[in-house]
Image (spheres, rainbow, N blue to C red):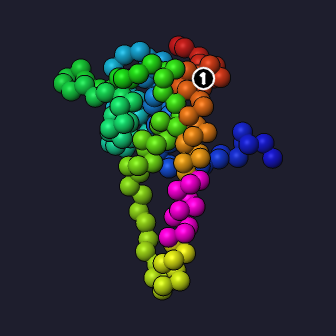
Amino acid sequence: MSTANRGVNIGPPRFKIAVHSVVWLAKSGSILSSSMIASQVNSHATFMRRVMQALAAEGIVESKGGRDGGYILRKSADQITLGDIYAAVASGAGEQEFDVDCGEAGEQLDVELEKILYEAEQQTIDYLRKYTIACVMDRVDFFVN
């Protein structure tokens, strides 16, 4: 089975949207509003603002207020890695979690599982840091209208 057709979903759901957003900001080279970015990545402007806030908190984008405000990259595309974006949106994902009471053994299992998952996530981020936004953009054919 080809991985290109599988729709692989690793990491927080916001990751792909965040990468697309950063690519569009890099392509534009200018300030884009959350609604403009949302229309480019087929998302909702309110959701985009949450994603962009997470990216701004990590210094990837900068928010400009006012009538002509929006978001702009704080770094060039060759200085932003996929790992940077992953780490930004993973820390503020805000996904709903469910607590299940599995007793003392369950608590111990949860602690160990969290350690393993943390290590896996750190390895994922390290791997993603090998790829910059510029590298990803070079691998994609953009058709400019």
Asked if residue 114 lies in the magenta stretch, the reply is: yes
For image coordinates 50% across by 50% down, the residue present is 12
Question: 59 above or below 72?
Answer: below
Residue receiving disc 1: 135
Which kind of residue does numbered mark 1 sit on? Answer: Cys
Say which element carries label 1.
Answer: helix
Question: 121 above or below 102?
Answer: above
> Extreme right residue here?
1
Q: Is residue 43 at all visible to an observer of this figure?
A: yes
> Extreme bottom residue here?
103
For image coordinates 41% across by 49% down, the residue present is 91
Q: Position of residue 135 (x, y in %)?
A: 60, 23
For image coordinates 33% across by 20% down, the residue present is 31
> Extreme left residue here?
66
Q: Main secondary structure of the magenta part?
A: helix
Question: 130 above or below 15?
Answer: above
Pointer 1 local density, CA inside 10 Å: few below 14, some 14–19, many at least 20: some
Asked if residue 93 lies in the magenta stretch, the reply is: no
Q: Is residue 17 at all visible to an observer of this figure?
A: no
Q: Is residue 21 left or right of residue 132?
A: left
Q: How many marks?
A: 1
Q: Position of residue 121 (x, y in %)?
A: 55, 51
Q: Report the front residue among 85 and 35.
A: 85
Q: Which residues are magenta?
A: 111-120
Q: Is residue 112 left or right of residue 75?
A: right
Q: Position of residue 53 (x, y in %)?
A: 32, 39
Q: Report the front residue among 135 and 113.
A: 113
Task: Specify the quadrant of the image occupied by residue 112.
Answer: bottom right
Q: Position of residue 72 (x, y in %)?
A: 35, 23
